[in-house]
């Protein structure tokens, strides 16, 4: 491979210095693989420029995503807001290991089953509502473990807040195909971008200090809508 060839695609000429790869990459790979395949550092100039002046196609996608997501989280309480994004991070972390592959409909099925189980429990009836598809059942199991820990660790009852976060996630997953690009993984792709963006924003704060003014460990602050 010639010395000036992009190391990512091994086809086009590398013209942009990539701090993540330590080599010059082509503009196409820089634009399409940014923060997905390439783990861009927060101080990358091309990353900062793209966030400030995203291409028109990305701006249109962002507007569609905002129209889907913002109405679903606008009226959430701080605790519900945090639980909602906690759920998204769990789903995003689980997706790469999911077998069979996970689709938006599986997400909706899994969180709906969990919500229904909690709603039934709040009425005094213990009954496990099971998701229908195998991928949804496996996701449901993973989410239940994490949410049960949240319930055990909480100082006040949070079951109602968890149900609301689950139902809003179900709505988003069911509405994504019509509201976004029309594929079976629109919502999964959306939350991947959201989680990556939250992670990139939280790193500088974590590096500055691991404690807040009270001396307790700092928490991830989910940005408002």
Image: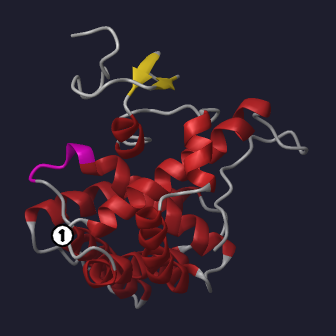
Q: Position of residue 36 (x, y in %)?
A: 37, 42
User: Of 156 and 3, which appears nearest the observer?
Assistant: 3
Res 210 quadrant in image: top right
Q: Position of residue 187 (x, y in %)?
A: 32, 68
Name the quarter where the C terminus is drawn: bottom right
Of all residues, the one furthest to the right in this rendering is: 213
Q: What residue appears at the point 36 percent right and 53 percent down from the top-left corner?
A: 92
Which SS type dominates the magenta stretch?
Answer: loop
Q: Position of residue 74 (x, y in %)?
A: 61, 83
User: Of 131 and 222, which appears nearest the observer?
Assistant: 222
In the image, which residues are magenta?
96-100
Q: Which residue is mark 1?
A: 184
| Helix, strand or loop under label 1 | loop
Whether residue 147 is visible here, answered yes or no, is no
Of all residues, the one furthest to the bottom in this rendering is: 123
Name the quarter where the N terminus is drawn: top left
């Amino acid at each position: 491979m010639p010395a000036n060839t992009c190391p990512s695609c091994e086809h086009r000429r590398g013209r942009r210095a990539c701090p993540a790869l330590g080599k010059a990459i082509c503009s196409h790979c820089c634009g399409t693989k940014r923060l997905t395949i390439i783990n861009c550092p927060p101080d990358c100039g091309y990353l900062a420029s793209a966030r400030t002046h995203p291409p028109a196609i990305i701006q249109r996608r962002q507007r569609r995503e905002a129209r889907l997501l913002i109405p679903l989280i606008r009226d959430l309480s701080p605790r519900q807001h945090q639980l909602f994004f906690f759920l998204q991070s769990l789903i995003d972390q689980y997706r790469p290991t999911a077998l069979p592959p996970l689709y938006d409909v599986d997400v909706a099925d899994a969180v709906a089953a969990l919500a229904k189980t909690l709603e039934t429990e709040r009425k005094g009836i213990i009954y496990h509502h099971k998701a229908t598809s195998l991928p949804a059942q496996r996701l449901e199991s993973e989410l239940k473990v994490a949410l049960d820990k949240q319930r055990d660790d909480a100082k006040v009852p949070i079951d109602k807040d968890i149900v609301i976060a689950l139902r809003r996630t179900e709505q988003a997953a069911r509405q994504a195909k019509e509201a976004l690009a029309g594929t079976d993984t629109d919502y999964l792709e959306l939350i991947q971008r959201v989680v990556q963006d939250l992670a990139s924003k939280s790193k500088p704060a974590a590096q500055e200090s691991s404690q807040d003014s009270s001396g307790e460990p700092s928490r991830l602050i989910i940005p408002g809508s």
